[in-house]
Amino acid sequence: MKKVKIISMIFIMLLMISISIVSHAAIDQTVYFDIKYDGEIKVNEEKTTVTTLAGKETPQHTNVRIKVDIEGPSTPKLLAIDSTGKEYDIAQIGYWGPSQGFPIQGNFYNETMVRATYSVAGTYKITLSLIDVQNDDDILAQREFTFEVKGEEPAVTNEVVNETAQELPKTGTSLIEYAIYAVILLVIVYAIYQIRERRK
């Protein structure tokens, strides 16, 4: 009898876990995140991104907010402005949305402009999780984004190197050398002429 009770309890627990997994899978399919931006992300350059939270036929949740987890060589600045005009650094807070959460239901599409600045180049992974504040921060939807932050390009210098011009070695025969050769030749010819004259 005890074995039957134990088996029944295990079966009920497994059934509850299965129902929970199925319900979460259904929620995951109705809510999604996206982050869009143009061009490359470069170190120490502010990049404007658009973070989207959208849903289709989503079950009602009265108190949700977005949890932000960051992995990388440093903590970037992720600045966003709420509906009251107040600016927050999401990376420092770790969440986006009021502490008590906000409601979602049915079909919705929300965009948030986030200005991101990375002080160190490298690979960053940002995980966005939609959590249910009223239900022990239960994760309703989640997505990971990987960003490659490019380093600073080396500065290009246009320095002109002043080098002393070296005289190129001379090639061929100069006019002075020709004149010297001509004089020597005339001397030889004159000497031969004198020798012949004396022999006569």
Image (cartoon, helix red, strand yellow):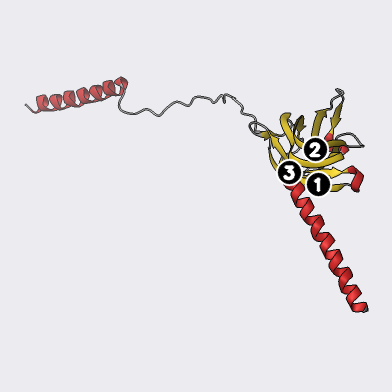
The residue that label 3 is drawn on is 30
Res 14 label: none
The residue that label 1 is drawn on is 140
Q: What residue is rendered at 82% in x and 48% in y?
A: 139
Q: Toward the viewer: 85 or 147?
A: 85
Q: CA distance from mark 2 to mark 1?
A: 13 Å
Quadrant of res 199: top left
Q: Position of residue 163 (x, y in %)?
A: 54, 26
Quadrant of res 112: top right
N-terminal-most mark, 1 or 3: 3
Answer few, some or many: residues within 10 Å of disc 1's Cα (few below 14, many 20 plus, some between 14 and 19): many
Q: Amino acid at mark 3?
A: Thr
Answer few, some or many: residues within 10 Å of disc 2's Cα (few below 14, many 20 plus, some between 14 and 19): some
Answer yes or no: do the residues labelled 2 and 3 have beta carbons within 8 Å?
no
Task: For marks 2 and 1, give the one nearer the viewer.
Answer: 2
The residue that label 2 is drawn on is 105
Answer yes or no: do the residues labelled 1 and 3 have beta carbons within 8 Å?
no
Residue 78 visible to the viewer: yes
Residue 67 visible to the viewer: no
Q: Amino acid at mark 1?
A: Leu
Q: Toward the viewer: 194 or 69?
A: 69
Q: CA distance from mark 2 to mark 3?
A: 10 Å
